[in-house]
Image (cartoon, grey):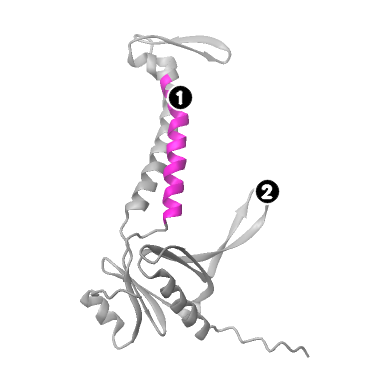
Amino acid sequence: MLESITLPSELLTYIGSESQDFAVKAKRANPPKASIFLILFGAAWLAFTSIFVFAFLGPLFKGKEVEFLVNDVPTVAGPGNWQPIVFPAIIIGVFVLIGLLMFGSGIYLFLKKGGYFVGTNARLISYKKGTFRSIDWEQFSGDIEVSGDELKGNISLGLRTGKMVSSKNGPERYVPDTFYISGIKGALEIERICRKRIKENDPTPPSTGFKN
């Protein structure tokens, strides 16, 4: 059963006289899979680069010298002779920064709050921080994915629009755009409503099964 929520006055004004099929407030702005992947990958990246941090820079922090090869020539850096380690330290710092950015981005995406989503007979409306987005049901392809349970579920709705993405080991492939509703109650019921509206507004002529 769908929960009843109070919508902001500006959203109600935007909806106007359209009847509402459902109205929910999402706990998250993004699906958890994307954010968890970034968090885990960023953590693994940092763990890997920390090996070089401790190996090259650890002794320096303790006031000791560190020995390494430069063009197969043994080189020593330490107190009073920092120049040989400057370039390796910059490279290591860049890798550490990349790991921190990935890990931080994952945390940000995971904690980013969602907005309001309202389905009517004609369109799907999203609203967050004064910004509205409206997509007619005919713009959705009918490719829907649901995860979670009735108390906290996630829905991804495939759109008819998309883009071509290049691949290193193969030809370009078409990747459709996706609309996410994450961290909501009654995800299964909302999925059934969305599927019904998409079928009702499908611009593709039905196949008769006969050929000329």
Q: Measuring from the top left, give residue 128's x and y in whole percent.
A: 29, 67
Give the secondary structure at mark 1. Answer: helix
In this view, the residue farthest toward the right is 212
**Which residue range is magenta in the image?**
32-54
Residue highlighted by disc 1: 51
User: Of 35 and 165, which appears nearest the observer?
Assistant: 35
Give the secondary structure at mark 2. Answer: loop
The type of residue carrying mark 1 is: Ile
Residue in view at x 39 percent, y 19 percent: 57
User: Of 205 and 143, which appears nearest the observer?
Assistant: 143
C-beta proximity under 8 Å, tags 1 and 2: no
Asked whether residue 110 is in view, the answer is: yes
CA–CA distance in space, label 1 to label 2: 31 Å
Q: Considering only order in the chain, which callout, 2 or 1, is on the residue closer to the N terminus?
A: 1
Residue in view at x 23 percent, y 76 percent: 10
**Label disc, if present, on residue 169 of the rendered structure:** 2
**Label disc, if present, on residue 59 of the rendered structure:** none
The type of residue carrying mark 2 is: Asn
